[in-house]
Image (cartoon, rainbow, N blue to C red):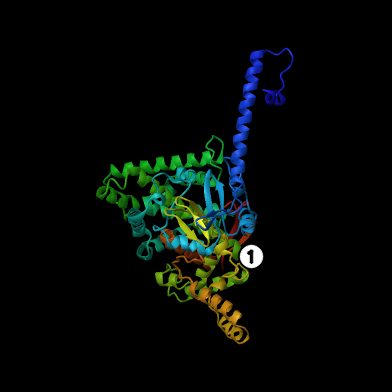
């Protein structure tokens, strides 16, 4: 008891019962402190790699008890450079380190080779995984929790609506019609906050295609709930009224309720629709495989597809316009490409054809460069389903992997001046080839470096409907490449065409981009639109 009295001395004449209770509380507090201290020490004693089967364990720190290193991870990074959270650990531990965030132990990969290996071994050594807090947000029966045949089946269903054939036949028309109407409505306003306006515009296209939902006749109720959901997406997972995470969960709850009402109404009506939407596809699958496609799974799937369709694309478009505003030379070449497309038309006001869309080479370069710098998909997760040894490290079975494209997209070995917006880097140039020939006379080392660069330029010339490579993963990678990648690319290209051929714009305020950990526009990006003569 001496130690307790030293911690909390009892006053002369105090009630013995009160003193005993006080002493007991002191002992309990001391015990709790010791437990926390042990956890904290344990979480920070892994900075030196230890040996296991001749392989090193991944170094790192678990940070503070319970919260780990979550707060530092979520802190706003004021530019598009590698966030300080990752840069500090990259400098200290190297490109592979462990941490604890959002109450999960994670191995973080900033190593392009490790990341590529993980994607290549999808469903052999690794599988899709997301933290429990994120699963609560997107739904326990969501598409991202499916694996193997079921995942491929659902992905094929989504491609029936958003694959190249349907894009060519129907969606390119719907996108252009919606974009033109939106741009026209912006003309009468002194200032437009671009991210919000583009999000609403894209939501109209996707909601109509997925669920035949006309937001123009419903006062944008569903879009407003999605907006509330988005605001708390990367918040600390504390579900208490008033917190951003709570508002996020309430937004999700309200959207799911609205989707269920639409689904129930669809079941109870025999009204025919103009075209097949995703509700029709889901009902078809439910009839064939009722165990695989439950109502909850259908609602979670629709919720995720609607969200993914507008959030990342609207961020990409906003980033593109910020880059173009600051780069008049790139903007001028973009305008010339689209003016040339328009000049070749017999009817200058006719819609974009699929062939014209496919011919937008510089537009595709602008899109890829903006997405490379903006990192609209900041992190991806996988889980090891076997013990894995790679690059001298042991990754035990059931380890959770966080993949971060930042270092891939800003790799100076692949991208010269990686923090510079340079759409021309996606082209092969004759000057570049000549430069390589000159180097070959001077130095074998320079030959290897230059040939490597030329090979990268060849490989990375993007087609309008983009995919991914180990050096470009804006749409994910491996078997989990975003099912809407083609759709997103189409929307961005059509938006740019309609914008630069008929309008000009002036930045009013905002335009700063930051990461937290995803792309953020802290002051928004406000523009004013003007018609071209």
* Relative image position of residue 361 (x, y in whole percent): 49, 73
Q: Residues within 10 Å of mark 1 (few under 14, many from 20)?
A: some
Q: Nearer the viewer, residue 520 or 135?
A: 135
- Measured as percent of width and height from the top left, residue 399 is found at 48, 51
The one nearer the camera, 256 or 373, is 373
Q: Is residue 504 visible?
A: yes
2 versus 472 height, above or below? above
Q: Residue at x 61, y 87 (%)?
A: 441
**15 and 355: which one is in front?**
15
- Taking 399 as reference, is 37 above or below it? above
Q: Quadrant of the N terminus?
A: top right
Percent across and percent down for residue 257 are 40, 40
The residue that appears at 60% across and 32% down in the rendered structure is 32
| Residue 343 higher or lower than 36, as above or below | below
The quadrant in which residue 154 appears is bottom left
Query: Which residue appears farthest toward the bottom when viewing the image?
Result: 441
Image quarter (top left, top right, bottom left or bottom right) of the C terminus: bottom right
In this rendering, position of residue 172 left or right of residue 186: left
| Badge 1 element | loop
Front residue of this view, candidates 98 and 133: 98
Q: In the figure, 28 relative to 383: above or below?
A: above
Residue at numbered disc 1: 326
Q: Is residue 511 visible?
A: no
Query: Where is residue 48 drawn, in percent x and y?
Result: 61, 53
Q: Which quadrant of the figure has residue 387? A: bottom left
Q: How many marks?
A: 1
């Amino acid at each position: 008891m001496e130690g307790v009295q030293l911690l909390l001395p009892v006053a002369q004449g105090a009630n013995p019962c009160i003193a005993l209770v006080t002493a007991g509380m002191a002992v309990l507090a001391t015990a709790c402190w010791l437990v926390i201290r042990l956890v904290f020490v344990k979480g920070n004693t892994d900075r030196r790699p230890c040996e296991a089967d001749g392989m090193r364990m991944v170094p790192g720190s678990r940070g503070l008890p319970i919260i780990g290193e979550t707060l530092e991870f979520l802190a706003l990074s004021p530019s598009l450079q590698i966030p300080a959270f990752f840069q500090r650990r990259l400098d200290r531990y190297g490109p592979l380190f462990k941490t604890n965030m959002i109450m999960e132990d994670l191995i973080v990969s900033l190593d392009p080779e490790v990341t590529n290996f993980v994607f290549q071994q999808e469903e052999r050594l690794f599988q899709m995984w997301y933290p429990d807090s994120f699963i609560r947000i997107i739904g326990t029966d969501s598409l991202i929790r499916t694996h193997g045949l079921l995942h491929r089946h659902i992905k094929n269903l989504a491609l029936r609506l958003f694959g190249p054939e349907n894009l060519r036949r129907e969606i390119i028309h719907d996108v252009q019609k919606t974009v033109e109407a939106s741009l026209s409505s912006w003309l009468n306003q002194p200032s437009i906050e671009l991210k919000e306006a583009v999000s609403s515009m894209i939501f109209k296209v996707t909601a109509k295609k997925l669920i035949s939902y006309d937001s123009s006749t419903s006062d944008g109720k569903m879009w407003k709930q999605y907006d509330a959901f988005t605001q708390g997406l990367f918040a600390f997972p504390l579900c208490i009224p008033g917190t951003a995470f709570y508002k996020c969960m309430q937004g999700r709850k309200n959207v799911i309720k609205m989707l269920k009402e639409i689904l129930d109404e669809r079941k109870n009506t025999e009204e025919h629709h103009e075209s097949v939407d995703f509700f029709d596809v889901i009902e078809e699958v439910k009839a064939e495989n009722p165990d695989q496609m439950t109502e909850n799974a259908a609602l979670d799937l629709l919720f995720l597809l609607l969200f993914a369709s507008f959030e990342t694309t609207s961020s990409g478009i906003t980033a593109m316009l910020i880059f173009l505003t600051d780069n008049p030379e790139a903007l001028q070449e973009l305008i010339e490409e689209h003016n040339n497309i328009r000049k070749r038309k017999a009817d200058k006001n006719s819609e974009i054809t699929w062939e014209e869309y496919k011919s937008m080479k510089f537009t595709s370069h602008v899109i890829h460069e903006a997405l490379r710098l903006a990192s609209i998909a900041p992190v991806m997760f996988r889980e090891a389903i076997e013990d894995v040894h790679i690059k001298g490290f042991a990754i035990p079975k059931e380890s959770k992997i966080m993949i971060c494209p930042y270092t891939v997209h800003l790799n100076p070995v692949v991208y010269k001046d990686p923090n510079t917006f340079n759409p021309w880097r996606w082209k092969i140039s004759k000057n570049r080839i000549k430069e390589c020939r000159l180097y070959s006379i001077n130095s074998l080392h320079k030959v290897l470096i230059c040939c490597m660069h030329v090979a990268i330029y060849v490989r990375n010339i993007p087609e309008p409907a983009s995919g991914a490579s180990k050096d470009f993963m804006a749409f994910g990678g491996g078997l989990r490449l975003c099912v809407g990648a083609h759709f997103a690319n189409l929307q961005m290209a059509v938006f740019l065409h309609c914008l630069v051929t008929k309008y000009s714009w002036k930045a009013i305020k905002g335009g700063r981009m930051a990461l937290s950990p995803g792309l953020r526009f802290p002051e928004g990006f406000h523009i004013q639109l003007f018609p071209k003569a």
